[in-house]
Image (cartoon, rainbow, N blue to C red):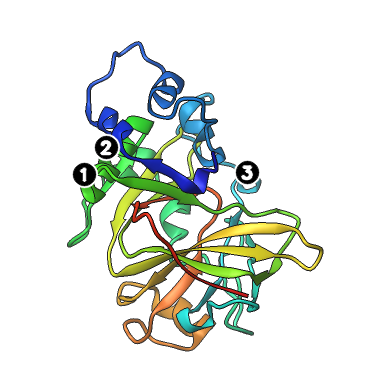
Amino acid sequence: MEFGHLIFVAFLCLALSKIDASQSAKDYWDSVFPNTSVPEPLQDLVFPPKKSNLPIKVNEEKQYWTLFFEHDLHPRKMMRLGLHNHSDTKPSTRTTSQPFGAWLQAKISEKYNLDEVCGKASGKGEHKICAASLESMMGFAISKLGKNIRVVSSSFDENHDRYSVVEVNKVGEKAVMCHRLNFEKVVFYCHQVNATTSYMVPLVASDGAKAKALTICHHDTRGMDPVVLYQVLRVKPGTVPVCHFVGNKTLAWVPNLGTKESCSA
């Protein structure tokens, strides 16, 4: 079953119930999604590596970022994903489809320890959690969106940087985003995202290679970095909707509406 289309209906009640302490994350996954392989972004959460609070090495967490206007999200539009890692956070100023990471990526690459990141008080109107288990992540998403939800993520090929948009599929206007924190210990920073629209955007490279981009369009940009917005798009916070692709290590939990709105090339 494709990860981007997993549907959570009756099985999600399990996420709210207390499980046996001896049950592994893999057993829990199998109880919720029998006969379904664990999706790539959740592999380390279900099959934990050696735990440590040390930061992930720069070359172990590459990110893809593109910042653009919502009206530019349409079939046949050429996009540069921008292979982007933590050692390079300065956005280009040449076009509106350049690497973008300084705004949100700063949250997951700052040189704080895990307790400082997760223990920081929530901002006004923010609902967040640091999820170190599949159960806690799902429980938080359910508490914000209800039981009938699904999870979507991007799938990019590291060997390609430029793609053409194939189609634009609207996912919904409510989401819980979970970002893999920049620590070897597997922890996701999850928060409810308001005033946004989510899309899944199939892409194709010039050689036929395909990718899928989880795309978030922010309608309230007052909290965005004014320097980044001006450098990349020449706009000020709070003026126009702004969109960006999301990297492979981020998940979005969204309501399962049962339908999709799309436009094709």
Question: Quarter-wise, where is residue 132 in the image?
Answer: top left
Query: Please, is residue 254 above or below residue 104 in the view?
Result: above
Residue indicated by mark 2: 139
Instruction: Name the residue rendered at 60%, 43% in the picture.
Output: 57
Determine if residue 181 is in view. Answer: no
Q: Is residue 136 left or right of residue 52?
A: left
Percent coordinates x, y for residue 190 in the rendering: 34, 48
Residue toward you, 162 or 185: 162
Percent coordinates x, y for residue 10 in the rendering: 29, 34
Percent coordinates x, y for residue 181 in the rendering: 44, 45
Outermost residue, top side: 22
- Tell me whether the residue at label 2 lies in contact with that at label 3, contact meaning CB atoms closer than 8 angstroms: no
Residue indicated by mark 3: 60
Residue indicated by mark 1: 143
Which amino acid type is shown beneath numbered disc 3? Glu
Instruction: Name the residue rendered at 55%, 43% in the picture.
Output: 2
Outermost residue, left side: 124
Which amino acid type is shown beneath numbered disc 2? Gly
Residue toward you, 13 or 243: 13
